[in-house]
Amino acid sequence: MRSSSTTAAAPGPGSGVAFLYLLLPSYWSSRNRARRRERGDSLRLALFGSVGLAVMGALFGGSFWVTLQLDQCAELGDFLLRLGLSWLFLTLLSFLAFSGIVTDLSTFFLSDDLRLLLAAPIDKARLFYSRFLRTLGQSSWMVVVFLCPVLTGVGVARCAPATFYLTAGLTVLPFAVIPVALGSGITLALVNLFPARRARDILMLMSLLFAASIVLLLRYIQPERLLRVESLPDVTAFFTTLQSPITPLLPSFWAGETLFASLQGGYDWLHGGALWTTALGLTVLLRAANDRWYFSGFSKAQEARKTSFTRLAVLDRLARLLPVSTVPRTLLVKDLRVFLRDVTQWSQLLLLCALVLVYLYNFRVLDLDRIPYMRGVVRNIYAFLNLGLAGLVMSTVCVRFVFPAVSAEGAAFWIIRTAPIKLRDFLWSKFWTAVFPVFLLTEILTVAGNELLGIDPFLKVVTAGAIAFMTVALVGLAAGLGARYPRFDADNATQVSGSYGGVMFMIVAVFYVLVTIALIGWPSSVYLMSTVRQVSLSAGQPLAMGACFLTGMTLSIATGWVGMRSGVRALNDMGR
Amino acid sequence: MIVIQNLVKRYGAFTAVDGVSLETKSGEIHGFLGPNGAGKTTAIRMVAGLLQPTAGSIEVNGHDLAAEPEAAKRSLGFIPDRPFIYEKLTAGEFLRFHAGLYGIDGDGVDARVAEMLGLFELTPWKEELIEAFSHGMKQRLVMCAAFLHRPQAVLVDEPMVGLDPRGAKLIKQVFRTMADRGVAILMSTHTLEVAQEMCDRISIIVKGRIIAHGTVDELRQMAASTDDSGALGPDDTHLTSVFLKLTGGSGLQEIDEVV
């Protein structure tokens, strides 16, 4: 027998940053993904790159402009900038905490590689630090990417010294650690408290909490107060009311103060120190808590042979009432059942509902008559902004719920492909499943918004009709492109929505919404003007108006149909 | 009955399946053997309608798969090597869904579902979510689905993976019974004992081509004829040594060196 030289020689706990070794597979996977050349890579890179650069440029420009404006208001400007930084970080704080909870659940408890790692003789601390670093990176990269242009814009506008940018880096790091560590702590507690494998239920709970916090935060800010003309001179007092006794205790306040001090060329050691000590303290506490409760939590997450679920027998009974044949009815019931039983899917509807409520509430509280510009025709034109927003909401709903519909079949798609059904029928069943809920949601949004605005009855009919056509277009486009660019290997629907096809859909959808609004906006404005000025339309105008409406309708039906056709073709071409 | 003629599948310059022809008659269990990467799964996936052949034809129970895909699939049952199914459905719901896909509706469905669950010993799990099932249970559930619509031909890719001895014995009995009732079964497997025990005829595929075809006895004689000595060795009663001889090379390495 030949002697082996490959004895186990893993770095021990004393070997400095040995935990980084456990991140190597993630690094290698990313590197291999980057090296792999696939069709459309250049287009994808150009598309994502230009969209990313445009967004970053807009963020930079926006923060630069706002800071310049504030700079002209002397002391009030400084005060508002400090407050703005503090509020910016407060918003990011809640996002990071939520993101930390969700990511932690995946990295610490649900990842497939955990079984391999836990079966290996790895020190607890190494596992904790590697996983925590991964959680931190995954949950905060978006915040960092967002903050880079924003803070640079602020720095450039205020001609900040180079130390400002260094301080920004040294502030953002501990600022991200604090909420992510807190989120991880909450996940650890919840995983231990739940009796069985209910990890995904935790996500539902978190979604509810997050939705509620968004609603509360928005109501707390009361943005409509800014639009009251008589309150404008008292804007300082208004912003002061936003401060609460607990604000100085929040890391967002510390981050804002530290950055503001460094903008002035100094350094706020108190708040900077508070950030770092809290971040390090929380990390140590979290590690201790992990030492004590991680394994029991992980073990519980593997348990439960039987999970509780809703039978949803009513779906079968309701589906039988539909005048459709067996195959589409079967597909519909299956899709609804799978959707309603997957907490990660339907819990996002709660978020959506919260946002819709806030959206409508804003219309209710906007006191348009007090603002001189919002009278008469302009009020009606505002209805088109409402329609545009409804179109964007529809696009977002479609990219999140309709676009991933084909990908949601996942590895089980073989069942559909080997069944004696036409893939065209399969995709159309996805279309019909989605079209009614999307239509209802956006129609309610538009009709209710228009009622609250009190717009002209003609426009109410036009926008309500436009929503019906937009639904056909966007649902068809989303289902079709979802079939054309499926991601059967994706872990969740969000990953599918964020893929190349998802971004492509959003670009086309936004373009379509803008064109549609232009097509129905012009004839509507002609009609409104003639009503306001009490002049009759010229001979050719009704014809041109009709042509515009007809083009809008044709464009909508064509968009939906072309999308679906392209999807069906792609499905039929699978396996070529 | 499954009839495959001159089946070819190319991926760019690589030919995964190269002119495969075989026939699985009614009531026959046809074994499809070959080393890893030989093209078995590619061929099986083409017959299941998951991959489009580059050339050649596939006929299932008299229906051309390319011309009449729905009719061909309606009379075919497919059991893939990895049982991916909808985790958020119960076993009963999955089978009812499967029945719906094959256009089976009405009062008889529940009885048929119960019958299949009973046959594959899954009745106690009828109302449980599939996500709680073990690999072997999922495999048996997929088999329930494959036989649910009373197909005249069944396509099986690696049937014994993940099954315990009791499950494996059950599956062998079910396959044999189904074949005795006239169902044509085309089965790809690595488990040569299973092939030897169950298959009426065997086709061996290497590098995309069928290199041998016949009953176990016929294959044994073929292996003997390829041997320099021309005689059967003492181990050649087993399909394993016949398979290794026909596919070229022992496939074994110097274990001592590795260990």
Image (spheres, coloured by chain):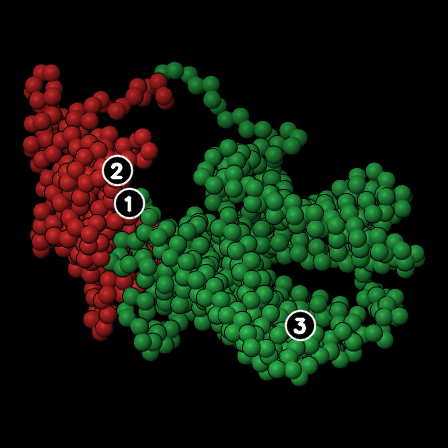
Mark 3 belongs to chain? A
Report whether residue A561 is seen: yes
* Most foreground residue, B171 or A158: A158
Report whether residue A438 is seen: no
| Element at label 3 | helix
Q: Colour of chain A?
A: green
Q: Colour of chain B?
A: red
Q: Label 1 amino acid?
A: Leu
Q: Quadrant of residue B19?
A: top left
Q: Is residue A371 left or right of residue B84?
A: right
* Residue ID at (48%, 23%): A7
Q: Is residue B131 left or right of residue A193?
A: left
| Element at label 2 | strand
Q: Position of residue A430 (x, y in %)?
A: 39, 63
Is the Cβ of the residue at disc 2 closer than 8 Å to that at disc 1?
Answer: yes
Q: CA distance from mark 3 to mark 1?
A: 53 Å
Quadrant the C terminus of chain A occupies? top left
Mark 1 belongs to chain? B
First-in-chain label (2 vs 1): 2
Quadrant the N terminus of chain A occupies? top left
Q: Position of residue A223 (x, y in %)?
A: 75, 69
Q: Which residue is mark 3?
A: A382
Q: Which residue is mark 1?
A: B51
| Residue B9 circle label | 2
Q: Are there few (<14), some (14-19), or many (20+) residues within 10 Å of tag 2?
A: many
Q: Are marks 2 and 1 on the same chain?
A: yes
